[in-house]
């Protein structure tokens, strides 16, 4: 199991890109951190989620 935004999820073994495809996150407007390290968007397809990882997905919201 991995912790994503504070919730336990069964995403181990997927790439970050594969996981994000199953969510409603707009990948153009997010930043992702795994175990305290920011993952560049260009690396999403090559970044494997491992059991025990702690992932934070932050969405950017425009406004005025």
Image (spheres, helix red, strand yellow):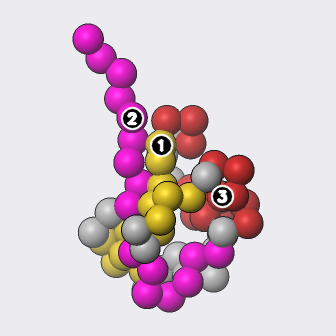
Q: Is residue 9 visible?
A: no
* Label 1: element kind: strand
**Does the stretch in magenta take in 40?**
no
In the rendered view of the protein, which quadrant contains the C terminus?
top left
Give the residue displayed 30% in from the left and 71% down from the top. 7
Q: Distance from label 3 to label 2 (Cα)?
A: 18 Å
Give the residue displayed 69% in from the left and 58% down from the top. 43
Residue span colored magenta: 48-64
Q: Residues within 10 Å of mark 3 (few under 14, many from 20)?
A: some
* Label 2: element kind: loop
Do the residues bearing badges 3 and 2 touch, measured as CB atoms within 8 Å?
A: no
* Label 3: element kind: helix
**Does the stretch in magenta take in 58?**
yes
Circle nearer the N terminus (3, 1): 1
In the rendered view of the protein, which quadrant contains the N terminus?
bottom left
Q: Quadrant of residue 46?
A: bottom right
The residue closer to the viewer here, 36 or 22, is: 36
The picture places residue 47, in percent across and down from the top left corner, at: 66, 69
Q: Is residue 8 above or below residue 25?
A: below
Q: Quadrant of residue 45?
A: bottom right
The picture places residue 18, in percent across and down from the top left corner, at: 65, 63
Disc number for residue 30: 1
- Residue picked out by circle 3: 44
The residue closer to the viewer here, 47 or 38, is: 38
- Residue picked out by circle 2: 60
Give the residue displayed 66% in from the left and 58% down from the top. 44
How many marks are shown on the rendered structure? 3
């Amino acid at each position: 199991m991995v912790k994503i935004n504070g919730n336990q999820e069964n995403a181990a073994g997927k790439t970050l890109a594969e996981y994000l495809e199953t969510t409603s996150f707009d990948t153009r407007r997010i930043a992702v951190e795994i175990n305290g390290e920011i993952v560049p968007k260009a690396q999403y397809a090559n970044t494997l989620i491992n059991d025990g990882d702690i992932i934070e997905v932050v969405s950017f919201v425009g406004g005025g």
